[in-house]
């Protein structure tokens, strides 16, 4: 297309960088010199019905204004002598002018805020202040729609890629966990045999302590593998629930009993406050125990000696079930809480650094309760303690 050709939206600059900026909308319609008379502009409008406006420039290419078809042709119809007048007398001296690198969205905002008339007359695209081309609202809308479609395709491709990566990650973790479990179980079994001195007493008593450490480390590693695999499955929406009616007081009492010895070693007391007449809960009992163990072990871990961890349950007025674990431990700030709910997000505190852990417990618990249609509520204050509650929806209560 030559500069004197009529406007053609397909002829606008379309290199990859400029396609979705003002440069991509700039159709290089030949401008009009400021000393020309309106007759020249009228002739071009007559020959090219799709030309909405002409840009008026000086001899160096600096934009002086814009003369639009409708205004000029209306003035000419009313007074034919208009054709003899210089275009500078009838032009809009303050057209919407945008730099070539401006984004499509910003052009739309400026058009709406500064020059709504540009919807009809078009706008001027410049590069470093000099005329580059004429842009139109039609071109802007078409290119914005194209950009939206491109972004949708890119997002869809990214989503499919992420899903594929998640599936690959889950498969890898499942295979690795299987390969690791086999020798790990053997190591733990032999360590327990040595710890219990099944084949006879050790000549050096310290060996028994070493065996206990090996077995304890193996159990910790096994827990890590299980949590990692469950979290990966939950993130990939591949974690299934095996649901049945659950006796809530029994499960809460059993979980507290499992942690009571560890708590006692740390000088922490576990107290239960659970009504015996709570209705049955429709849930996955194994995953419920897993959630409670995560919350209780965290509470015990981060509660100093002489502290108290309270396990309670109640029915809310709307019928939902609240199972909460409250501790008198170190607590968390809002920033620390957000970090704790992220995978691997251990809290970096003086007490926290004294305990092993991966930071998978709370994120996994959040995934598991949300899988049940519930939520994890947390209230925590630094140096005053933390309350974490599993909230199950009313439709999971009292099922036969």
Image: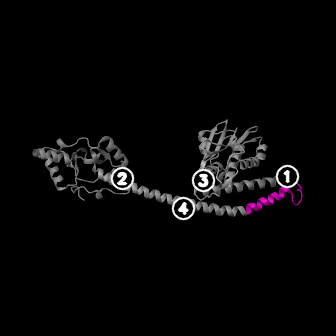
**Callout 2–callout 3 Cβ contact below 8 Å:** no
Residue at 18 percent of width and 52 percent of height: 45
Percent position of residue 98, x then y: 32, 46
Give the secondary structure at mark 2.
helix
Residue 129 horizontal side relative to residue 205, left or right: left
Labels 4 and 3: the sequence-earlier one = 4
Percent position of residue 265, x then y: 79, 44
Instruction: Please say whether residue 144 is visible from this viewpoint.
Output: yes
Percent position of residue 250, x then y: 73, 49
Residue at 36 percent of width and 53 percent of height: 144
Give the secondary structure at mark 3.
helix
Labels 1 and 4: the sequence-earlier one = 4
Residue underneath mark 3: 371
**Callout 4–callout 3 Cβ contact below 8 Å:** no
* Alpha carbon separation for disc pair 2 and 4: 30 Å
Residue underneath mark 1: 206
* Alpha carbon separation for disc pair 4 and 3: 21 Å
As for residue 184 lying within the magenta part, the answer is yes
Labels 2 and 4: the sequence-earlier one = 2
């Amino acid at each position: 297309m030559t500069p004197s050709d009529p406007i053609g939206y397909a002829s606008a600059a379309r290199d990859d960088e400029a396609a979705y900026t003002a440069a991509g909308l700039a159709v290089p319609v030949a401008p009009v010199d400021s000393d020309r008379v309106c007759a020249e502009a009228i002739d071009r409008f007559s020959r090219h019905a799709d030309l909405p406006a002409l840009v008026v420039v000086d001899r160096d290419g600096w934009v002086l204004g814009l003369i639009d078809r409708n205004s000029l042709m209306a003035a000419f119809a009313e007074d034919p002598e208009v054709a003899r007048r210089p275009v500078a007398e009838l032009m809009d001296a303050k057209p919407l002018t945008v730099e070539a690198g401006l984004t499509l969205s910003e052009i739309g905002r400026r058009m709406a805020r500064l020059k709504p008339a540009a919807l009809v007359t078009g706008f001027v695209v410049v590069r470093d202040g000099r005329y580059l081309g004429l842009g139109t609202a039609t071109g802007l809308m078409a290119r914005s729609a194209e950009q939206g479609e491109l972004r949708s395709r890119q997002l869809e491709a990214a989503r499919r890629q992420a899903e594929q990566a998640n599936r690959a990650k889950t498969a890898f973790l499942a295979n690795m966990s299987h390969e690791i479990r086999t020798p790990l179980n053997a190591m733990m079994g032999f360590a327990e045999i040595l710890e219990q001195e099944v084949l006879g007493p050790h000549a050096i008593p310290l060996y028994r302590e070493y065996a206990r450490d090996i077995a304890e480390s193996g159990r910790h590693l096994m827990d890590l593998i299980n949590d990692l695999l469950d979290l990966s499955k939950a993130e990939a929406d591949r974690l299934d629930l095996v649901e049945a009616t659950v006796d809530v007081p029994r499960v809460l009492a059993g979980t507290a009993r499992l942690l009571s010895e560890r708590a006692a070693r740390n000088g922490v007391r576990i107290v239960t406050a659970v009504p015996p007449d709570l209705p049955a809960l429709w849930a996955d009992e194994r995953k419920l125990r897993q959630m409670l163990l995560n919350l209780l072990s965290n509470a015990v871990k981060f509660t100093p000696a002489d502290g108290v961890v309270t396990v309670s349950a109640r029915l809310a007025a709307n019928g939902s079930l609240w199972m909460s674990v409250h501790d008198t431990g170190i607590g968390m700030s809002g920033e620390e809480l957000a970090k704790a709910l992220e995978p691997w997000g251990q809290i970096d505190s003086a007490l926290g650094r004294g305990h092993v852990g991966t930071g998978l417990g709370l994120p996994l618990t959040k995934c598991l309760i949300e899988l049940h249609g519930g939520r994890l509520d947390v209230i925590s204050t630094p140096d005053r303690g933390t309350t974490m509650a599993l909230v199950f929806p009313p439709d999971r209560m009292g099922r036969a």
